[in-house]
Amino acid sequence: MTTMIRETAEVDEQIFFDALIDADERIEPRDWMPEAYRRTLVRQISQHAHSEIIGMQPEGDWITRAPSLKRKAILMAKVQDEAGHGLYLYSAAQTLGIGRDEMTRQLIAGEAKYSSIFNYPTPTWADMGAIGWLVDGAAICNQVPLCRCSYGPYGRAMVRVCKEESFHQRQGFEILLTLMRGSAAQREMAQDAVDRWYWPSLMMFGPPDDASPNSARSMAWKIKRFSNDDLRQRFIGMIVPQAEILGVTLPDPALEWDAAAGRWQMSPIDWDEFHEVLAGRGQMNAERLRRRREAHEEGAWVREAAAAYAASRTGAPSRSSSEARSADPRSLSGARSADPRSLSEARSADSRSLSEARSAETKRPDPPEDPR
Ligand code: BYC
């Protein structure tokens, strides 16, 4: 009998979940969700968080070498922003029942992915310009649609991230513009950086649509709103006029707008290089992970001190809050699914209908202005 009630409740939950997705409503941490939806989100959000944290390294390397005090201050603020993005994203992933300690363990053990783009070196100051313009530019194209992601905590985190990324892209553009208005050697340095970052930036959007195993389902769940290839096309459309203003050449002689097809024609992307980087054999993979491990070990005393301080105030045994959360698998996302009440009972008990929930919710902020 109990099993039947449970199964009926699950069917109702699935119907309710599907209805929320169809109605473009948000799924929240305490809502029931299919296990595959939860796993997909943990995969994407944790990878995204790791990318922000590893992404601090290529730019962090230039803080001491920035050409002026003003440039140093701006770069430092940008790198701190990336740390903040990592924190919002780890927090969003934690609402799905995975602990921050576990995500960190996966990263430093080399089990987790992070964006391919951060496995390339930054030999010159112009790389700070190219990263800001191209890498943050690609991030904006990818992330503005994620502000409308069906999972509430991820979508809301993206709103602030995108506002900051827009600023980052402008500062990268401005570095390149300054160099392009400088000496011949500075112009050459800027062009060389654009040549090196252009193709890896295109790879950030992921494999082509016909080789993207996750896209179809993520789009059906409204986690992703556009396919990898569509976003890549939008990105090219954004940077072509900007490259003209800068006076740099995009390193693809075949790049051309095909009005009949409504698409940019381009040379093929070197997907072998992409897969090599994903397999850990990029130019900087080993160094990025070595530095991340080292930072984790060096930060052990801070985590211990914070946990001891928290314990001294609550009298609880000293362990980090994320450990505590992940120790209870039902604490967050499992809460509703363990409740055998049918959906309608649960909803009337909650006295929180869909529309009430909508109006009670803080008004969802508008996604940031699309820079294109
Ligand atoms: N790098 O089926 P697909 C930043 C993986 S940081 C590595 O298309 P999906 C910044 C993919 O994970 C911004 N792996 O997957 C920070 C999957 O493997 P798994 C970083 C990649 O999820 C500091 C497999 O390939 N942005 O802006 O539908 C300073 C098949 O792919 C990559 C994000 O993280 C890649 N480039 O789509 C400056 C955005 N591409 O997981 C700037 C959030 C694909 O099955 N993420 N893979 O083992 C997304 O939007 C999506 O996850 C992706 C991939 C578009 C990246």
Image (cartoon, rainbow, N blue to C red):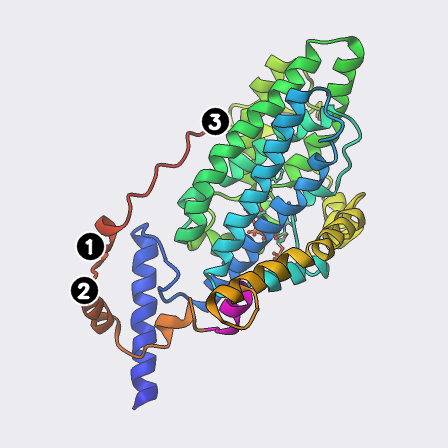
Q: Which mark is residue 117?
A: none
Some atom of ligand 1 lies within 8 Å of the CB belonging to the residue at label 3: no
Q: Is residue 184 above or below residue 15?
A: above
Dot 2 crowding, Cα within 10 Å, few <14, some 14–19, many 20+:
few
Residue drawn at x 31%, y 52% as measured from the top left: 25
Q: Position of residue 77 (x, y in %)?
A: 59, 32
User: In which image quadrant can residue 184 be found?
Assistant: top right
Of pointers 3 and 1, the one earlier in the residue sequence = 1
Q: Is mark 3 in CB contact (under 8 Å) with mark 2?
A: no
325 on left or right of 345: right
Of pointers 3 and 2, the one earlier in the residue sequence = 2
Some atom of ligand 1 lies within 8 Å of the CB belonging to the residue at label 2: no
Residue drawn at x 51%, y 33% as measured from the top left: 164
Q: Which residue is mark 2?
A: 351
Disc 1 residue type (three-letter): Glu
Q: Is mark 1 in CB contact (under 8 Å) with mark 2?
A: yes
Query: The magenta stretch spans which residues?
Result: 322-329
Disc 2 residue type (three-letter): Ser
Q: Which mark is residue 356?
A: 1
Mark 2 falls on what kind of element?
Answer: loop
